[in-house]
Image (cartoon, rainbow, N blue to C red):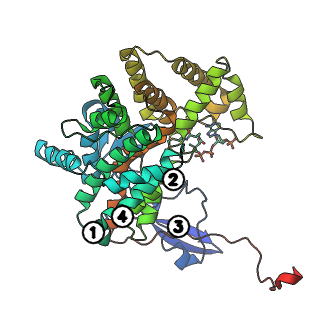
């Protein structure tokens, strides 16, 4: 990667009476950073920032976010344009290849997705080994890691044949997710079909059955495309940073993505969509009064947080949440299935946006707030919501893994720490402790 983001400007830092200079870098949209890579060598000091809120861990050409203005773009294209005009497969290509596909490129990519859609029959038997009610994210993460065993040629030379490996992963993750669901309800798996688009295929694998064929609803397919596109990438979030960090040890794509899936599982990250739904269901069961939840979230002595609100980067509306809210209204109207949880969610949002606690802390609805209501209307169980997030985020993880792998000055990710534990304790034999 050409280092044209160095401006020649330098920041001065004064420590222990001495002044040191550090280079300044500027990104495409003018965001500035101080390159502190020589800080420790020059000064013997470390930079300390738990949670990494002030640290740029890499330079990247994939996704841009302006958290103050609520802007998100993939490879330079605005998220609203992509969600309105593209299929998920086109956006997956954009993220993983860097440009929108031509018709020929799209047809070749879609052909690969079809070719790789099956999983090895031996893998299907794995599902039987999980206890009933196993968390779908645990299954997804371990099944993706298992792909290393079935495609060892891909792991011997991890960067070679990356296009094939990405298509294989994007296609198989969808099959694994649907098979895992079918297995969890004790139904036979439904195999992928070459005549269906990516999202229609997924829905068919989820909901078709030998006794009742699934009828593809194009509005639902379009909503799913939108949801997956909106989740496609979000720069250095926890799971993506995990994929890059694990990959920096030069581990293959499958193992790196498997680690990313585990990170996404957490309720502060992708698991929030499931937590939102559980919260809305509880509120509904309790008669619809959400005030207790708002008060709990504001109580400094209570660790409870209002799921679906707040974001590390956005200090205004998450641009994805508008689109999801609108899609939610459209899908529910089209399916003629009004959901009382949507009314509760809207009332809760209205109350929160007027509440000083949330206003002062810039806490707005995020991508996870309304997405679950759409998934619920489509028939996807709450326990699978975070799996849906993973399906969408996969092209982003792949794009970051590739970018990380290709960095000319890439090094293994290895943060330091400030040790504050005891020093030089004399050893005490076990029977004298
Ligand atoms: N409910 C109540 N208070 C909140 C919330 C919330 N959802 N989010 C942040 N705060 C408060 C927090 O208590 C703190 O207050 P104070 O200054 O009085 O200590 C202040 O706002 C700043 O919070 P923070 O913890 O420093 O913010 P963060 O950037 O570390 O955390 C977050 C970001 C997304 C983890 C957090 O907002 C949160 O826990 N939200 C709920 C979970 C959620 O919806 N996660 C999905 C995020 S978007 C998709 C994704 O990443 O997967």
Pointer 1 residue? 153
Real-space CA distance between mark 1 and mark 3, rounded to the nearest whole angstrom: 49 Å
Splitting the image into 4 quarters, where does residue 17 fall? bottom right
Question: Is there CB contact under 8 Å for labels 2 and 4?
Answer: no
Q: Which sits earlier in the primary sequence, circle 2 or circle 1?
A: 1
User: In this orientation, which residue lies closer to the viewer: 416 or 305?
Assistant: 305
Real-space CA distance between mark 2 and mark 1, rounded to the nearest whole angstrom: 26 Å
Real-space CA distance between mark 1 and mark 4, rounded to the nearest whole angstrom: 9 Å
Q: Is residue 15 left or right of residue 225?
A: right
- Closer to the observer: label 2 or label 1? 1
User: In this orientation, which residue lies closer to the viewer: 240 or 319?
Assistant: 240
Residue 309 showing in the rendered view: no
Pointer 2 residue? 263
User: In this orientation, which residue lies closer to the viewer: 130 or 260?
Assistant: 130
Q: Position of residue 358 (x, y in %)?
A: 63, 32
Question: Is there CB contact under 8 Å for labels 3 and 2?
Answer: no
Q: Residue furthest left?
A: 104
Say which element carries label 4: helix
Say which element carries label 2: helix
Q: Which sits earlier in the primary sequence, circle 1 or circle 4?
A: 4
Dot label at residue 12 = 3
- Closer to the observer: label 2 or label 4? 4
Dot label at residue 148 = 4
Q: Which sits earlier in the primary sequence, circle 2 or circle 4?
A: 4
Quadrant containing ligand 1 reads top right
For image coordinates 23% across by 47% down, the residue present is 113
Say which element carries label 1: helix
- Dot 3, how many residues are within 10 Å of its Cα: few (below 14), some (14-19), or many (20+)? few
Real-space CA distance between mark 4 and mark 3, rounded to the nearest whole angstrom: 48 Å
Q: Which sits earlier in the primary sequence, circle 3 or circle 2?
A: 3
Q: Residue furthest right?
A: 432
Question: Is there CB contact under 8 Å for labels 2 and 1?
Answer: no
């Amino acid at each position: 990667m050409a280092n044209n983001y160095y401006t020649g400007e330098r920041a001065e830092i004064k420590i222990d009476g001495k002044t040191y200079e550090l280079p300044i870098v500027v990104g495409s949209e003018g965001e500035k950073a101080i390159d502190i890579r020589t800080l420790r060598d020059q000064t013997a000091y470390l930079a300390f920032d738990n949670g990494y809120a002030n640290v740029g861990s890499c330079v990247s050409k994939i996704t841009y976010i302006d958290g103050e203005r609520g802007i998100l773009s993939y490879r330079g294209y605005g998220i609203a344009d992509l969600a309105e005009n593209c299929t998920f497969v086109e956006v997956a290509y954009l993220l993983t290849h860097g440009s929108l596909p031509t018709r020929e490129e799209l047809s070749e990519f879609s052909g690969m997705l079809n070719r790789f859609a099956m999983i090895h029959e031996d893998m299907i038997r794995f599902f039987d080994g999980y206890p009933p009610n196993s968390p779908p994210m645990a299954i997804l993460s371990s099944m993706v890691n298992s792909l290393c065993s079935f495609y060892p040629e891909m792991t011997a030379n991890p960067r070679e044949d990356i296009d094939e490996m990405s298509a294989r992963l994007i296609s198989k993750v969808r099959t694994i997710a649907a098979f895992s669901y079918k297995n969890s309800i004790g139904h036979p798996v439904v195999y992928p079909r070459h005549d269906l688009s990516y999202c229609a295929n997924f829905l068919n694998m989820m909901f078709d059955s030998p006794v009742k064929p699934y009828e593809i609803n194009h509005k639902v397919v379009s909503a799913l495309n939108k949801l997956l596109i909106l989740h496609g990438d979000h720069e250095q979030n926890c799971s993506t940073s995990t994929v890059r960090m694990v990959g920096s040890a030069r581990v293959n794509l499958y193992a790196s993505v498997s680690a990313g899936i585990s990170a996404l599982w957490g309720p502060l990250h992708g698991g929030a969509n499931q937590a939102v739904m559980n919260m809305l269901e509880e509120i509904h069961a309790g008669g619809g009064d959400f005030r207790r939840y708002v008060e709990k979230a504001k109580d400094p002595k209570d660790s409870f947080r209002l799921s679906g609100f707040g974001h590390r980067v956005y200090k205004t509306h998450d641009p994805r949440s508008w689109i999801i809210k609108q899609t939610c209204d459209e899908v529910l109207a089209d399916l003629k299935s009004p959901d009382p949880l949507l009314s509760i969610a809207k009332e809760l949002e209205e109350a929160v946006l007027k509440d000083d606690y949330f206003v002062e802390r810039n806490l707005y609805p995020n991508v996870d707030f309304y997405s679950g209501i759409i998934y619920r209307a489509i028939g996807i169980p709450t326990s699978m919501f975070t799996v849906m997030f993973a399906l969408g985020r996969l092209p982003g993880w792949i794009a970051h893994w590739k970018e990380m792998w290709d960095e000319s000055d890439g090094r293994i990710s290895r943060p330091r720490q400030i040790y504050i534990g005891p020093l030089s304790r004399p050893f005490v034999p076990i029977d004298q402790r």
